[in-house]
Image: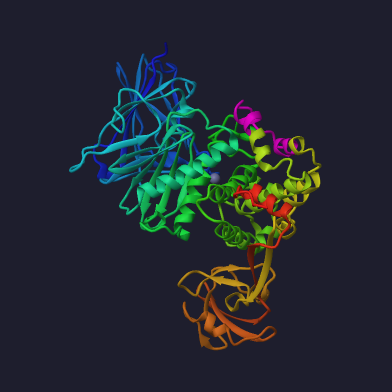
Amino acid sequence: MTDPILYTIAAPMPASHRFHVTLDIPRPATSGQRLALPSWIPGSYLVRDFARHVGRVSASDARGAVAVSKVDKSTWRCAPCAGPLRVQYDVFAWDLSVRGAHLDATHGFFNGSNVFLAVAGREGDPVDVMLVEPPVAGKAWRVATTLARGDAPQWGFGLYKASDYDELIDHPVEMGQFDLVDFDAAGVPHRVVLSGRHFCDGPRLAKDLALICEQQVSLFGELPQMDQYLFLTRVLGDGYGGLEHRSSTALMCRRGDLPGRDDKVSKEYRRFLGLASHEYFHLWNIKRIKPAAFTPYDLEQESYTQLLWVFEGITSYYDDLALVRSGVIDTPSYLELVSEIMARVLSVPGHRWQSLAESSFDAWTKFYKPNEDTPNSVVSYYAKGALVAMLLDLTIRERTVDRVSLDDVMRQMWTRYGKTGLGVPEDGFEVLCEAVTGLDLGPFFDRYIRSTDEPDLERALKSVGISLTCDITPAPDVALGLVLKKDTTEIATVYRDRAAELGGLAPGDVLVAIDALQVTSSNWPVLVAPYAPGDRATVHAFRGDELHAVEVTFEASPQRRWRLLADDDVTPAVAARRARWLQEEAPTA
Ligand code: ZN
């Protein structure tokens, strides 16, 4: 029986925003133990260098102090020691994001990748975690985490366990005062942990989330093995985000996103349900069905795959689909969500310049590191991935005459890769799609994954009795092809090959006047409204401290808006296909 490595997490002064970590290694490498913190966190493809928040690292053994030196940005090496080694360090926890660690006198939250130094060579060893209750005045704090409990009481401080380092860092921890919303799905207890001030109608949230979770369980046929599932939700005045884990998710939402005491599903609540649904779908798609490139994760450096669109795009397709399939929202509401995604993808030029395969591969330096040119050159593998997933699903349904669908492909992905732990090779999804459907989908993947073709959703939606119309409305505020930063006259974005760029304006330029009239943060739409396509104007703008005058020519600036409508007047066969897709009640003849 191996003695576990023990991490003790304390916060002697929560107001200092520092977790104090003590790491006891029973049998260290006596020739010099190396310790390292991950550089990135699975689910967020950016090198974040969590070690930058770690203060001085000290070590000691039975004889006294052991010298510690830094090897690289995230790695430390202890001098040779005799017997058990104790390592101590502080982690500054002032990043209120789902990827970070945050501590003050009201609550503590951390992801393991922020606080647990990995003991090199012992990553496969079992781990104990002692959570010490911080000294805070007032009501007692509780703990919410899906780490396995050792001697800690439920929701309490004390001993928790993980079977290895990989598991250790996949169970975020929330501590403080929080409310619990309970429900069961697939016979397993699920809880929403609400921290921060809120006015949530708990029973209603429980009812809706239960339907959504059950819908996803039925899609895959089973819930992966777990004792409980937690939605760790931080409620704020402003904020939004989520990060998936193997039996929990860390969410951040606005107070107004949570349901109040009326029956309407507001747009804000619908967005929150979509977020929760998204992270829950990841239980299968990315937490267990993983690209080979992440099997195992190399958390020291970037890992490249062209498949992020499969894991984020397909998940983004099913997150909203689960809302309508479970009956939590109705069909018009779902179609409105689809039209919003279409606008997000197709109104910006990037989708014509970067393929989904490229967007996936370059996530580390493009999608997660945007610059002024991002709208021109980058496509979201989430949003366009969702549209292409829908197109793929509808294409499969139509071409196989409803014999199979993307649901069947995802079930096979689960059986073949998720349940076996085998990584999905780079061509694995495409190969499996063809095997399950019996279709030649090479041309589809060439067009929509490896090139930048706009998804032909109009035809596909027609096959399920949904008409897609594209309204073209003039949009005076983009008549020069530029977007201003909110509440300023500074240019945020200049669209490729459009009037502002051709005239010589650039991101960062601060507009001063157009045809000698002063531009303010609020009057820009009014100032440009009188101009017609072909009109010329002189624009004055500061670039740095130098004033420039440029000539611009206004252009016709159509803005496309998409509307989706379920047709009433369709054949019974089409109505039946739509009902099967959205899992509506079967139409009566
Ligand atoms: Zn996701």
What kind of colouring is applied to the model shown? Answer: rainbow
Q: Residue at x 72, y 35 (%)?
A: 432
| Residue 113 pos. (x, y %) | 44, 36
Q: Nearer the viewer, residue 85 or 576?
A: 576
Name the residue furthest top: 1
Q: Is residue 117 above or below residue 334?
A: above
Residue stretch in magenta: 414-433
The answer to whether residue 478 shows anywhere in this view is yes
Q: Is residue 416 shown in magenta?
A: yes
Q: Decide if residue 115 is on the left or right side of residue 527.
A: left
| Residue 565 pos. (x, y %) | 64, 63
Q: Is residue 75 above or below residue 490?
A: above
In which quadrant is the N terminus drawn? top left
Locate residue 139: give its quadrant. Answer: top left
| Residue 295 pos. (x, y %) | 60, 30
The mark tally for this picture is 0
| Residue 164 pos. (x, y %) | 46, 24
- Quarter of the image where ligand 1 sits: top right
Name the residue furthest front: 589
Q: Nearer the viewer, residue 32 or 320?
A: 320
Q: Is residue 310 shown in magenta?
A: no
The answer to whether residue 286 shows anywhere in this view is no
Q: Nearer the viewer, residue 212 or 163?
A: 212
